[in-house]
Amino acid sequence: MSGGPSGPDQEPATDPKPAMDPSADAGPVIEAEAPQAASPQAAVPPPLPRDPVARFWSVAAVPIAAVVLALLVGSLIILASSFFAVGGFEPLLPVEAYSSLLRGSFGSVNGLVNTVVAATPLVLAGLAVGIGFKAGLFNIGAQGQFLMGALAAAGTGAALAQQPPPIAIGGALLAAAIGGGLWGFIPGALKAWTGAHEVVTTIMLNYIAAAVIGYLITGPLAAPGFSFARTGPVGNAALPIILGRNGHLGILIALLAVPLAYWLLWRSTLGFELRTVGANPNAARYAGMRPGLLTIFTLSLCGLLAGLAGGGQILGTSGFMNASYGTATGFDAIAVALLGRAHPVGILAASLLFGAMRAGSGLMQIEARIPVEIIDVIQAVILLFLAADVIVRRILRLRAARSGVDEIQTVTRSYGEQAAR
Amino acid sequence: MTEPQAIQPSAPSAVPSPDRTLAAPVENAPALEMRGITKRYPGVIANDHIDLEVRPGEIHALLGENGAGKSTLMNILYGLAVPDEGEILLDGVPVTISGPSDAIERGISMVHQHFMLVPVLSVAENILLGEETMANAIFLDRSEARRRIRELGARFGFEIDPDAPVGSLSVGWQQRVEILKALYRKARILVLDEPTAVLTPQETEEIFAVLRRLADEGHSVIFISHKLYEVLAVADRITVIRRGRVVGSRTPAETNEEDLAELMVGREVQLTVDRGESHPGEPAFTVEDLHVQDDRGHEAVRGVTLEVRAGEIFGIAGVAGNGQDELVEAITGLRKPKQGRVTLGGRDVTGSGPRKLGAAGLAYVPGDRHRFGLVLSFPLQDNLVLTSYHKSPFARGLVRDDQACEDWANRSIAEYDIRTPSCDVPAGTLSGGNQQKAVVAREFSRDLKALVLDQPTRGLDVGSIEFIHRQALAKRDAGTAILLVSAELDEILELSDRIAVMYRGELVAVVDGRTANREEIGLLMATGRREESKSPIGAEV
């Protein structure tokens, strides 16, 4: 065990004595060690196994189990609700419901495309939350950033509607990125300069974003000639359809964002700094990094991604924005990021799952007469199981598994501890 | 629990409360016997059939390196862990200890290394926490509590003011409060976990006197330590644990430091590294009239001036909390000084951040490796480039080169003898000694003019300490200016060419490291003066 990579021919340079005491061997540290105050860092997970399958399982076991358990809970709710609504007891109803859900989302080409389209904004907004987690930031503001991106895309798209498509699309997407990015920059700057906690500021900015949209769309940006307040059509700024009936260009953007995010986090110095600040801000300062600047950068980047998600929705699916534009994509993104363990590939997988549930729920409602709201219930239960991962691990007897969902620690990390110096 | 009458000095080993005594105590039985205690954790046997016997009135030292299994054994005794095998006997009667409150009720008390005291409460209030002496169903009987605290203090040789806020007491006195707390709960077996780690030599002597009084009164004391001379000075018997097993039991009369070190480490150890001749050159690192504020805005460093020459180790001794942390943070760029000047190799670097200072040739081994030195959840190889990740060959522009990091990590692991299964395990899974070696490997292999070592061997085992001291001396011989800050006086005395004592934010004396006198420095650390003076009891700050 002490061998490691050091060959037998390599003598420790300045130590003429025989090999050091074996009791200093690596291995789980049993005794608490000396007079150090409680460390501010998260508990250290056991090392990842080297075997790729075991490695995957050690990270993904809890999320997968959480999904399975949530589906079980969902079937209980389906049974109970049909009992109270119809009065009869249909033991096979959950099976029926889930099989409609599955056929609705994966059973046909259209279903598949719908799944992918529904997953697209979740991927981008999920990355916006997940990258924040990696930097130790809880970006609840993905919703506001999403909305600002949508607004910027809708306004710019309407203004550029008559321009040639490359200019219109490029301009509208750029506006979405800037709009969302600005909405991320603000809490980043507030945190870096004043220490204001991002959880508080991003929540507030979500409300501000909704209010700004309400004002601009009923006022300056309102298009004439409609019976309700909305922006003008985006015209040439609409994203081209590249897949099936409604698969728009945004899919490609989301698919590109995944490897880019991975590269940024694990292959670039910037990502190394970002993750260091997230794991141990003191060590980051000690290593000469600048936590304040990195916080601003990270939240701006998160905002940019969420803004693109919002812009993609406007330009790719609806084609305009109304005053009460109200998808909860930015909040679903939190669940997606947690379920995906803040890993770009995990976020992609979680987005597809959530997208599939959205896309298939219509068929489920028609065939099994189960209201689509059951999807929200299942998503919420997934979150509960992720947050209370102890339950999941106990059920699975995953005692030796890697820690549950570390990202939860970012969510629950206390307030004062985080305050910038 | 109402217990109005004072403890009678004539009945020191009080019988456990009656409802717990299933069998009568056996005559002449040891106060505590642990037989064949075995505790396995996945992959490790923390305790492997450990036998321990502690007699009434005995100070029993438990000696072993970090990770040897001392804490596990004491956690089992205190009911915090359940042994897989073995039994515990109190006064010859087998018992099962279900948890800390059960242990306390049976007369076992633990004084932790980190005091469990509330600074804003008074001595009496702290002692009453969890063991309230009630006047009636609603109100505390404070006067009775005060009386008993005074009486207990007097009996064991220290007079303490029960109304003094604990926060105003020195560390040594806080420790006495912890001991009082145990005695107040009628502890017969006291476990002290590294009680001297935070004390000056004088305070250590005083605590030893208290422990001897306790033993004379029939209490049993289990004293956990890895400091050999202390164990020899205070213990009646010494049990040495290595890798979960008892490897020897000695009385101080039949052993010496070398023998104990060999038992503890499992090989012959050189306790003091031969430091050789130093050849100081030009001043490489200077600090002039530095003033630094702490987090609360108090001036923690008040006009420190010092000069470290190339090829010299300049030691700063002092009781923790006298401004050393702020001084070190200010000169390593982690804290902005309020006033003063710092130069490195003749260049003014006052107020520069860590990145600039690193580029100018300053490396820093931080005192708290968990807080500053390492990112515990990151792989070892990332930690080994934590301060140079942005430079060639570890990165080109924005792109990191993992292969270069890995090659570098493997070289460091070999050169600095870091025991690890591989370079991609999280740093937090390594033992403390190996974590520190990783920090040392990283910082020592930079291009150095000056090196700041803050508590470089805190909490480490003898073997790692020896290794790190050798490395530091090798750097000194290579012409690096080294500033060593340590609360461990032995370390300062062993390595420093010159020694300064820091007291309340100032350097109160600078003495020659080779002729320095341990007592004199201890006194300077405690009082800031060279002569003893009586300070009011319990009121030292």
Image (cartoon, rainbow, N blue to C red):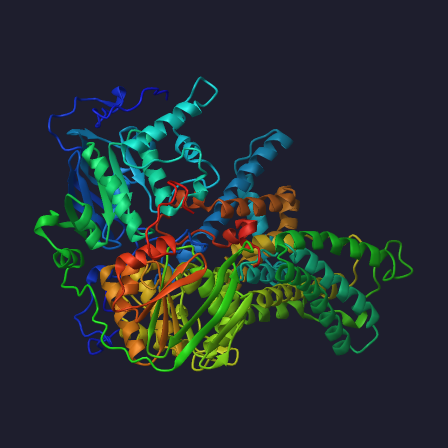
Query: Residue B148: percent from the left, percent from the top?
Result: 35, 26
Identify the residue shown where x is 20% and y is 75%: A8
Q: Quadrant of residue A356?
A: bottom right
| Residue nearest the observer in this picture, A112 or B478 | B478
| Residue nearest the observer in this picture, A101 or B52 | B52
| Residue nearest the observer in this picture, B335 or A182 | B335
Identify the residue shown where x is 34% and y is 68%: B438
- Left or right, residue B8 beside residue B258: right
Query: Residue B124: percent from the left, percent from the top?
Result: 41, 32
Considering only vertical position in the picture, is A339 above or below B268?
A: above
Q: Is residue A114 among the parts visible in the rendering?
A: no
Extreme residue toward the right, this view: A225
| Residue nearest the observer in this picture, A76 or B397 | B397
Identify the residue shown where x is 41% and y is 42%: B539
- Left or right, residue A122 beside residue B224: right
**Which image quarter is the N terminus of chain B in?**
top left
Q: How many marks?
A: 0
Identify the residue shown where x is 52% and y is 50%: A413
Query: Residue A120: percent from the left, percent from the top?
Result: 63, 62
Considering only vertical position in the picture, is A290 above or below B390?
A: above
Considering only vertical position in the picture, is A417 above or below A282?
A: above
Q: Is residue A384 among the parts visible in the rendering?
A: yes
Query: Residue B466: percent from the left, percent from the top?
Result: 24, 66
Extreme residue toward the top, this view: B136
- Left or right, residue A116 beside residue B428: right
